[in-house]
Structure formats: C-alpha cells, structure tokens
Amino acid sequence: MRSLRFLMSLAVLLALAVPMVAQSGAVAAKPATAPAAKTTTAKGYVAPRTPDGQPDLQGIWDTASITPLERPKELGTKAFYTDEEIKQYEKRRMNDLDRDRRDGGATQDLARAYNDGWFDRGTHLARNKRTSRVIDPADGRFPPFTPEAQKKYDEFHKWFAANPGNSAEDRELFDRCLFFSQSGPPLVPGNYNNLYQIIQTPGYVTIYSEMAHQTRTVPITRREKLPKDVAQWMGESVGHWEGETLIIESSNIRFNDHSHFGTQYDGMTDENLRVTERFTRTAADMITYQATVTDPTVYTKPWTIELPMEKAVGPIFEYACHEGNYGLSGILSGERVKEKEAAMKAK
Amino acid sequence: MVRSAKRARGIAACFGVVVFLASASASLAQTSTGLPRIASGKPNLNGIWQVANAANWDLQTHGPSQGPAAFGALLSVPPGIGVVEGGEIPYLPKALEQRNKNRAARWTDDPEIKCYMPGVPRATYLPHPFQIVQSPTAILISYQFGDAARPINMGKPSEAPVDSWMGWSNGRWEGDTLVIDVKGFNDQTWLDRSGNYHSDALHVVERYTLANANQINYEATLEDTNVFSRPWKIAMPVYKHVEKNARLMEFKCAEFTEEMLYGHLRRVPSAKPISK
Amino acid sequence: MMKKILSTCILGAGLVMAAAPVWAHHAFAAEFDANKAVKLRGTVTKMEWINPHAWIHIAVKDDSGKSTEWMVECGSPNTLLRKGFTKNSVTAGMELLVDGYQAKDGSNRANGRDVTFADGKKLFLGTSFTGAPGGEK
C-alpha cells in the first residue's frame, strides 16, 4: 500500500508537479535574460504602492516552471541547485519530458497525449533555484498521511483503479471541469494556463486565474464568515497585510474523492483544513508566493510550497471547459464499451 | 414628463458649445454630480450588481405562461416589461423562424440549462449577481453563474484570436461612461430563455453609466447582419447589492448538469467504498 | 566528487519520472486505446479552437475513395494563442497527417499524438512566446 501511494505521488508529481519541458520553438525565442540566470530575489526590494497605500501586486503573473512539486528522494535535504546543476537539470528534463519523443512503447506514447507545442509549463527551473516546490518539511516532500487517512486513501484508490469510469462524479475534478489546482488555494501550477491577473481595489484583492476562469475576490477586512456547512471548491478567503506581505487565509474548502491542489487527495478531510497564502512582491517582475496547508485530519504535519510568480505580458484567454468537454463523454462511453466487450467474452 | 425632457434638450442645445469645450476635461463637468470615484477620477463601478427585471425570461414585453407542468408556479414564466428600445427585435425573416423554433424548444435547448457560459449581454441580466472589479489600470467582470468572467482590455484595442463564449472585450471611457466593445463570440449562446439568439457575427457595444452610488444605467447595442435587419438596443438599470455581507458565492452549475449530460453513460450499479 | 554523485542522482530521478504516466487535462489513457494505433491522412473540414481541448475534424479517404470524418483531440488552445495562432491558422482544405490512438468506444476519434503537414513538418509549433517566464516581457 505504501508503494501504491509512492506510485501515485510519482504520477502526481509528473502530472501537475513536474511541469515538463517546452518545445523547441519557445526555446529559440528565449531572450538572454532567462529566469534561471537571475538571483532569487532582490533583497530589500520595496513594492510600489496602490493609491490607497497597499504594496502593489497588480498585473499578470505566471507560475510556470519545471521545478517539481516534491523533491526527488535522492536529493535528501538539498533545497537549492547551484547554477551549474541547474543547467544540467534543465537540459535533462527538457529531453526526458519532451512530449514529442516517441520512445517508450504505446502506453507511454499515448500518455504523452499530443504535440509538445500545446504545453506551456515553462522551460526553466523556478527563479528561486529550489529543488522542489514543497519547502517544508525539510525533505521537500509531503508529510505522511495520518493512519486513518492512509487507510481511506488506499481503499479508495484500489477501488478507483478497478472502476475508472463508472460515472461523471467518479472522475477527477479536472475531468469534470469543476476545479483545477491552478486556481487554488493554494495555487499549484500545471501543464498550461498558469497565468493570473491580480487587481487591487480599496478593501479587496482579486485573483483571476486563467485556468477555468476562476476568480477569487478576497476582502481585506473582517466579514461575517460562511457557516461551517457551506463549503466551496475554492474555499472562503479573507486577507490582511503584514508589512509588505498579503496574507490570505482560507477555510470552508470543499473536497471530493479526487485531486485538489495538485495532489491526489481523498475526501476524508473536514472543516479543520486551512490554507494560508503569502504574497510578497520581491522584485519589480516577481511576487514570491508561499502557501501552507494545515490539515490535521489528513496530514501528520502542515506543509508549505513556494512559487515565484513572474511578470507576464498576457492577455489571459478564456478557458471554457465544461462547454466543450467531449473528453468526459469519451471516457465514460469507452468504459461502457469495454464492459460490453468483457461481457461478450465471458459468454 | 415630455415637457421636461424637451426643456432638458433645449438647455443641452444652449450649452452644447460649452459642453463641447468642457469635454476635453469631462471629469471637470461631471464631478459635480457627486458620483463616487476611484483614485483615477473615473466613476467607481466596484461592487456586486444585479438586475431586477424579467429580461432573462424574454427581452421583449411578455405575459405570463405555463412552464413545465410538474413545477407549477415555480418554473412558470413571470410577466415582464421589455427592455428592447422600440419594443421589437428586428429579426430577418429566416432568423425569426429560427427564433420561433428555439422558443418552442426553450425547456430543452436553452444553453443556460447546461450551465454554458452566458455570453454578453445576457450575463448582465441573468438572475445572478456579478461583480465589477475596477482599479485605475484594470477592469474585470466576474459573474456568479458558472464562475464566468471576462477581463476588459483597457489598453490598445486588440482582436480576438478565436471565438469564445464571453467574447473579446475592448473597453474605453467616454466621459463618465465605460464603453465596452465586444466581438469574437461563438454562435452557441442565446439572449434569453425565449429563444432570442445571435450568430458568431454578433457585435455588442455595452455602456455602463453610473447614475448614483447604487445604480448603473446599462445599455447594449447588438449588431449581427446574419440575424438582425439593423442594430438594436436594450437598456435597463442594474442595482448594487448594499447588504453588508454581499459577495459572489460559488455556483459551479456544471456539476448539476452531469446527470442530464452524462447520466446515460453511467454504469449501473455504481457504488464507492467511501462517500463524502 | 560530491558534484558527480549529485548529478547521478538527478539523472536517476529523471529516468524514473519519465517512465511514470503523465497527465493532460484528462488522462488520455482513459479515453483512447493504446492497442489501437491509427495513422490518418486527410483534409481539414473544421478546426474547433475550443477549450478544454481543441479538435481537428478531418475527412479521410480510403482506397475505394470513400470519405470518413475523424475528430482529432489536441491540447488547450490558449498555449497556441499565446504563440500567435488564430482561427485562421488551421483552415479547411489543409492536408494533414495524424498519428495517434483511436477512442476506446470505437468511434472515429483519435488523439493527435503527432499532427504534421504532408511534408512531415509539425503543425503545432510556436512562433512568438509572450506568456511564460522568460518570454518577452
């Protein structure tokens, strides 16, 4: 069971966590000032101010990078790469994860889905030079599940492996166009559409995510909270400023049996789940984003991720999903045909 | 009423030259109206807004009618005064036939049933709130229905690369009015629950004029040479939610359409070891 | 020495991950059949630049001259729009080669594992790149 979880986390790692390498056209278009060549942050940077005096986080930002969510176990507690290692890592990753590769057999070939040109997961390690997006615990990996959570997780995923397409509600949230890790909280990059627009108005900060056009307008004041039993996929967020940092705290987060914030995650959590996000403008062209997930029902310890959000040009395009979701029908009808074929064989 | 309107026009004519001269600094002439403004001097459209009319049932004046019998009064069509200038939508003859077909199939074919993004201008008069987010440099409109949203390009106007559900919005200020030019629509949305529709040639020009702190006068001109014989206009007030606790809540209605859209592909029986 | 060990570790991690399954908007393995590889040559009848995935419709002629319509699933258009693609980039009548896998339900749908022009050049390559880090700022 432990190994199942390991395999799942590997899959997940690849899925949302290890954004893969971009196509050659984009590489050719890179200017000399590639992010990896820059320093992590300009220390002591002070953000410009909005008209009402808040640090200004506004603009379009991109979180794409090839930094994995969890650190490869072999690296232990090594949290940063040297510049030399970065070059090596990036080169290998671009080759390993190139979707246009046709080696690896039919299963791998199909899993690579379509041409690499459709991916927009960045071509470089994130500017913070970290070896993983998870920065706490110190090994850069998610803390273990609680025993109860582990049991439910194993039980559920064993069942799901045998029943991958019983109905729409049995599929992952992203298959159903209901929720994507990109929109958060916390914000977890994926293979494309990692763009955000932040707009600040007196008393509010709005975070608009390209992935599935999800908008969070966060009040920077206290207001009456939703009752405990009213949960939303994006939770309920309230913000405040601590010096240069915008802190957003979220609760009332809804779950189902499938992935959330880029990790396979069972529906066994409860109202104890909290996400605390920290947005700090650390350079003219960068916001340093950190998010801590505290979920005592599922995780034995809280965990924290860090992402540099880099200034991007935009525009943000519409990502309608539900409207053109032929894929979900295709998955379910494929399963029904397989069942019929199996029944015929059995006769 | 008529007299006062005439008098107003007369006054406007008298002062036309003055107004024209002042228009270069329009805000000077209009700050006296006491509208709330943001730091850039533009009227403050920030807030959560919603219409209070029956336009989503039918843009034109209509009486009540029977809905699906099982739902009795709940889903019967409430009457409403129309929002179309001049009363009639100027359909081309063939397009009117299509509208009538749509209307006959309103309880099955309206894309609102499937939780598809509503397009513009319908998003404005859905019976759900929407939020305008406006800073001196950016404007975004987000809608509670299906989490639809559209960023408004306030910079140099640009062209839609492909068609989309909510269209491609280029905004600009004309004095105190926010004008949004929207093109690049697909042909999949309707204009109301009565089958009024458009093609992918639709061009909408919206005008948001703050009447007072809690009311926007909303106008939209629709042009679509495949469907209408001339451009036509709708107009309606939109009201601000002034409740202290007002907010958009999550209404991801896609979830509520799954049985309708995918129920026939369900495995029977289907049971999970754990449920939430 | 330390450096060398680390490099080996990094290389090792890369290999393990390359062998694991990968994810698109939805897992294509759930929708298409790895045992049904198809190679199609056809002309575009329609390009749907829709999310979550773009679909190319192509008419494929068999040896007897009979034409069959196929739908080919690609990725999210937004990435390509950022690279300068528009609705005029793929037009009806274009001749394309599609190498992919057929849908599990047996319908004429396939994933566009590789979509190329008749001369083998990849169709979905970008020209400019403005959205992502390291792009034009």
Image (cartoon, rainbow, N blue to C red):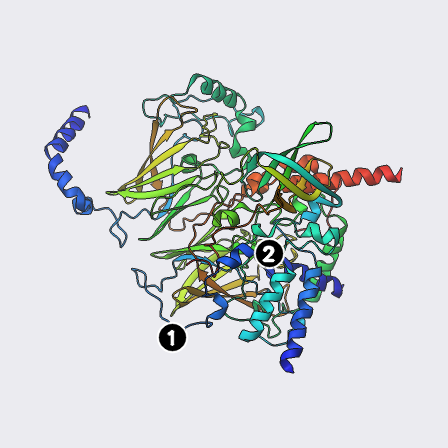
Residue B32 in view: no
* Residue A16 vs residue C15, the one in the foreground: C15
> Mark 2 — on which chain does it sit?
A
Residue in the image at 43% along x and 24% along y: B227
Q: Quadrant of residue B184?
A: top left
Task: Name the foreground residue: C18 vs B108.
Answer: C18
Amino acid carrying label 1: it is: Gly
Inspect the image, locate mark 2, and give the three-letter code of the amino acid beneath it. His
Q: Residue at x 26, y 48 (%)?
A: B42
Say yes or no: labels 2 and 1 on the same chain: yes
Question: Does residue A92 appear anywhere in the picture?
Answer: yes
Query: What residue would you read off at disc 2?
Result: A260
Q: Earlier in the sequence, mark 2 or mark 1?
A: 1
Place residue C61 in its image quadrant.
top right
Q: Secondary structure at mark 2?
A: loop
Q: Residues within 10 Å of mark 2 (few under 14, many from 20)?
A: many
Across and down, in percent, residue C77 comes to: 53, 45
- Residue at label 1? A44
